[in-house]
Image: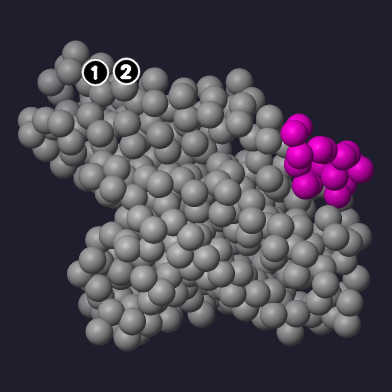
Amino acid sequence: MAYILLIFIGYIIFTIDKKQKNFPVPTVLLILGIGLSFIPFFTSLEVTKYMIYHIFLPPLLFSSAYRFPAKGFKENAGIISFLATIGIMLTVALLGATIFALSGPFVSLSFIGALMIASILTPTDPVSVTSILKKSTGDEKMADVVEGESLINDGTSIVIFTVLAGMLTKGKSSGLLSFFGEFLVVSLGGILLGVLFGWLVSKAVHFTHNREYQVMLSIVLAFGVFNLAELLHLSGVLATVFAGIMLSFEFGRSIKEDNLRDKLDGFWNIIELTVLSLIFLLIGIQSAQYLVFNAWGFALIIFLLSLVIRFLIIFGTTQIFPHWKNKISSRESILLTWSGLKGTMSVYLILNLQSKGSGEVDMILSLGFAAVLISLIVQSLGVYPLSQKLTK
């Protein structure tokens, strides 16, 4: 019954959103979730790492990926791939080192602990941001880069996080060659698996002309390729993303697929809204217990550092490469930086760490939840006015 009430609350908020201009729905849901945590009826609810990773994440990834325009990916493939891989690694290294250097007066953190916080805050989650960018700027390029980066960087973040978590909780050590080897196998394996099954399903849908059956096949693809990749110790995130992108490429080649797209949109849009309602309300309920701690000032500093370092990496790399320099201006670098909200994947990583121990882990959890909360509130509220100002 409690979950049905959460979905109903989501329905109300999304309905209000239709009456407002660029209403930050995820932020409102998150704040409402924190408020619901004080009501005994909802305190028994919890969001687990399994729930986020295996139930909520595949449909969110797939619904975004198959709708991601093939043209947008082709035109921005270079910068999207760079920011979602090497850019993420540089961000973790620089942000982690800076957090460790400044942590002394506030909290006791090890260097690995600081890197863990950085890895939690690197995946981006532009829920509702892309539509705001398109409405406010009229330029789809920024929305394509933000959404494309977020789809791919989730897979990169999980690999980095897994290595660091092993070092923090089990004392494992990992050399650079070992890390890059694991990263390439897990990432490329997931991508190849996703492309293969995405192509197979794009052909298999023609075995039946019944659109409902074709939608059923898309469900099999979204969850099936994710779990198959995880079973093979590959990236389920990247497998699902590239399966969806492959469908987008294949659908883009034929006008006759428009009716199928309409059916897919009708189904996956409902699933996406339902999952978003549940996940952000549950995140608010779950995070409340970690938000009572004495290092909120440092959490704010961490959030500000994440913005500064993300800007330096985006602006720096676009200035180094002439082709990117002509495509991404300094103002657009600021907008890309601000649009990199933290969200679902960051919370999954936090909950994953929660199951691995206590002690320093508790402080990492609190700082992580607090920084994610600040990011969702401040950045989502600022996207529209900032984009309006920067694009005038």
Amino acid carrying label 2: it is: Leu
Residue assigned mark 2: 200
How many numbered marks does the figure carry?
A: 2
Q: Nearer the viewer, residue 170 or 172?
A: 172
Q: Point out residue 149 in the picture as x, y percentages from the top left corner.
A: 44, 52
**Residue 275 % position (x, y):** 43, 52
Q: CA distance from mark 1 to mark 2?
A: 5 Å
Q: Position of residue 29 (x, y in %)?
A: 47, 69
Is the residue marked by circle 2 packed among few (<14), some (14-19), or many (20+) residues within 10 Å? some
Contact, mark 1 vs mark 2 (Cβ under 8 Å)? yes
Q: Secondary structure at mark 1?
A: helix
Q: Nearer the viewer, residue 237 or 293?
A: 237
Q: Residue at x 30, y 69 (%)?
A: 133
| Label 2 residue SS | helix
Q: Which residue is labeled 1 in the image?
A: 203
**Residue 78 shows up from this direction:** yes
Q: Position of residue 183 (x, y in %)?
A: 64, 35
Numbered range of the magenta stretch: 163-178
Within 10 Å of disc 1 (Cα), the crowding (few <14, some 14-19, many 20+) is few
Q: Amino acid at mark 1?
A: Lys
Q: Residue at x 32, y 61 (%)?
A: 327
- Toward which corner of the image does residue 302 lie, by quadrant? bottom right
Q: Main secondary structure of the magenta part?
A: helix
Q: Decide: is 362 above or below 79.
A: below
